[in-house]
Image (cartoon, rainbow, N blue to C red):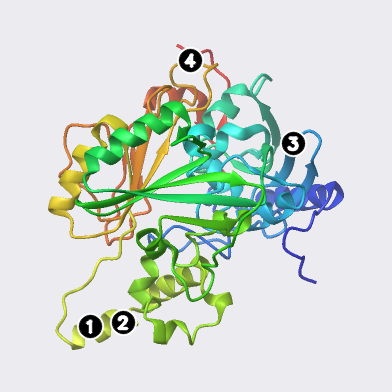
Amino acid sequence: MARARGEIVGWAKHRTAVEDLQRQLAAMPAAAPVRLAKKTSNLFRPREANPVPGLDVSRLNGVVEVDPRAGTADVQGMTTYEDLVDATLRYGLMPYVVPQLRTITLGGAVTGLGIESSSFRNGLPHESVLEMDVLTGAGEIVTATDDNEHADLFRSFPNSYGSLGYSVRLKIRLERVAPYVHLRHVRFDAISELIDTLRQILKERSYNGEDVEFVDGVVFSRAESYLVLGSWASSAPYTSDYTGQQIFYRSIQQRGEDYLSALDYLWRWDTDWFWCNRALGLQNPKLRRLVPRRYLRSDVYSKVIRWENNHGYFAKLDAKKGKLPRERVVQDVEVSLDRTEEFLDWFLDNVPIEPIWLCPLAVRDHEHGNQPWPLYPLKRGSSTSTSASGRPSRSLRGGRTVTSTRTSSASSTRWVVTSRSTAMSITTKRPSGIFTVERHSRQ
């Protein structure tokens, strides 16, 4: 029987699911590569087939417990943010950072990366983690916290992309929410003006006398860009609905302010995959009316793209029409705020793809040195702006491009600036194909 979305699974079912996962790992051939067998993915790169079945993690996809008094939740690693939000909003709480797409998992966002409009004050998803249970390559469950004997694992897990093990449970902090979000769409005629205003908002956490809890932006062209500023509201004169026929990113150009429910605000980008579903024709009003609302979701679009990657149906149609092969790319690039204008100027001159999404972020942790997360190179005090659009930026030179991911191309490219010596000092290869932590003294 299918579990209702947001249902609390409880500790007994959680322990049973973890024991089952350990048995699966023990039964795998020692030299076999280990992957997770998942029904959903927010990666767009084609992957090689795994010669052995992946670990079935389908029983580790729920919220174990929410403690509204402490403002925390214990969450299984494969829980989607859609389920997590449904479980926490009923208590008037939400995760510190809720990435843009419904089926991104908490474990994936912590071991990889996740970002949203609260990241300028709350950092990245891993910065709200209090403790985690990690399945290591030895088949053990290790509980890691910031101050226990597994603190190296806790600090190095973010941005390790599964190489240190798989999180089966994460205890995270939650924050209070209001019922509604008041949006202000602030237009700029020059990108330099947007950057200057953004810098001031990041400093003051307000704009024109109103507190700012959420900040992101959209660049439509060099002469038209917007900051979208969100503030909690206890009441709203109206609420807009962007889960059906209306399109959120277009509303930014059409209205100076807006009101959304807290839930609809969190998923405002999911319905249209930002704007990427236009490649599927779903921003054509006539076609859009034919599609049931339940299919206007990012995970549905991802399935369509993966089907096309496997079968090449539309590519064959294009070839018959004499069209050149097309490259589907979603590109995230992190650059320092001081060089964002320079990057956008270059991008707009060289890459004919708009709009571009902007999202500022900053390290929340100010208690563990200048670079508190060894495998994530963002340092304290350096707010950055993320642009999600375009193709691999091979010709970008000079600035610090921290990481660019989710590249869907024939030969995917990633740039990662990280401390390789740090990573090697805490990891060792196990026959199972997963990395596990061995504690060493830091150099």
From the image, tell me which residue sits under label 1: 318
Q: Which mark is residue 314?
A: 2
Taking the image as drawn, is residue 329 in sight? yes
Residue 156, how many percent across, how many down?
A: 52, 29
Mark 1 against mark 3, which lies toward the viewer?
3
Q: Secondary structure at mark 4?
A: loop
Q: Earlier in the sequence, mark 3 or mark 2?
A: 3
Residue under the point 60% across and 59% down: 237
Residue 280 image-quadrant placement: bottom left
Give the CA separation, mark 1 to mark 2: 6 Å
Count of numbered labels shown in the rendering: 4
In the rendered image, which quarter contains the C terminus? top left
Residue under the point 35% across and 60% down: 253
Mark 2 against mark 4, which lies toward the viewer?
4
Query: Which one is in front, 160 or 223?
Result: 223
| Badge 1 amino acid | Asp
From the image, tell me which residue sits under label 4: 369
From the image, tell me which residue sits under label 3: 71
